[in-house]
Image (cartoon, rainbow, N blue to C red):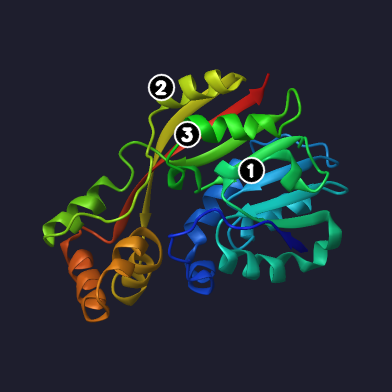
Amino acid sequence: MSTAGPSGSAGRREWDASTYDRIADPQTRWGAGVLERLELTGGETVLDVGAGTGRVTEMLLERLESGRVVALDASASMLEVAARRLERFGDRVRALHADVLRLDASMLGGWAPVDAVFSTATFHWVLDHDRLFAVLASVMASGAPLVAQCGAAGNIAGLIEAVRATGHERAGQWNYATPDETRGRLARAGFVDAEVWTNPEPTPIESGEALETYLEAVCLRSHVAALPEPERVPFVKAVAAAMDEPVIDYVRLNIVARRA
């Protein structure tokens, strides 16, 4: 699994990839469900946007008997874990360490245009969705499918209220879009046959250490990183205590479309 391309995400705190890989069962479960929507014959070249530690990328490669995957992520630590997991697929997978908003065909090493784009639990971290969909369209073959899922409007609203109950506002930036906004952006970028919908995905996490670890490593990662070291553990414990129940109130935005 070769790695190419610089990261365009200066200023983002690196993920704790080993912890994320250990606790990302919810994201893996969602990804498996989204992958079922991607119709493949087995020989395609697929761009996996936000491949992370490669847990879902591995499932994708297993469906591609002779196909290839470009595993793109802005986190070097995530791709290091993914490289170990995906080593058995040899030259059928390439890691691309890059900001998706800076992606162009030349960065895909001759594998462009791609036959499909797949993504889970990633697009809400990309602030400019108009540019996101335009960039993706620019590296896709005519008629290629886009199948994705990410955080939607209303995502983790209850958790954000728990953060406010501690006297804080959740730090960080994200784009939790609505279906109508997304349909318009897809159309402007040159996608057709778009189906966009949301679904609630309440996710229980065992209370105590498991919940606190999940909050720190995933939902409140940016906020915790900005706090002085002595304040981090007390903050996470306070948020966990302020939650009505140990359930993350996720809402997912689902996208199925086709490049015109």
Residue designated by label 2: 180
Q: Earlier in the sequence, mark 2 or mark 3?
A: 3
Q: Residues within 10 Å of mark 1 (few under 14, many from 20)?
A: some
Q: Earlier in the sequence, mark 2 or mark 1?
A: 1
Residue designated by label 1: 103
Choose mark 2 or mark 3, whichever is in front: 3
Q: Can you see residue 244? A: no
Residue 30 vertical position relative to residue 259 in the rendered view, above or below: below
Q: Quadrant of residue 134?
A: top right
Q: Quadrant of the C terminus?
A: top right
Kind of residue sitting beneath label 1: Leu
Mark 1–mark 3 distance (CA, rounded to whole Å): 14 Å
Horizontal side of 17 relative to 58 (left or right) equals: left
Choose mark 1 or mark 3, whichever is in front: 1
Mark 2–mark 3 distance (CA, rounded to whole Å): 13 Å
Residue 22 vertical position relative to residue 36 in the rendered view, above or below: below
Horizontal side of 235 relative to 134 (left or right) equals: left
Q: Quadrant of the N terminus?
A: bottom right
In this view of the protein, which residue sits in the foreground, 132 or 237?
A: 132
Residue at x-position 27% and y-position 56%? 171
Q: Which mark is residue 129?
A: 3
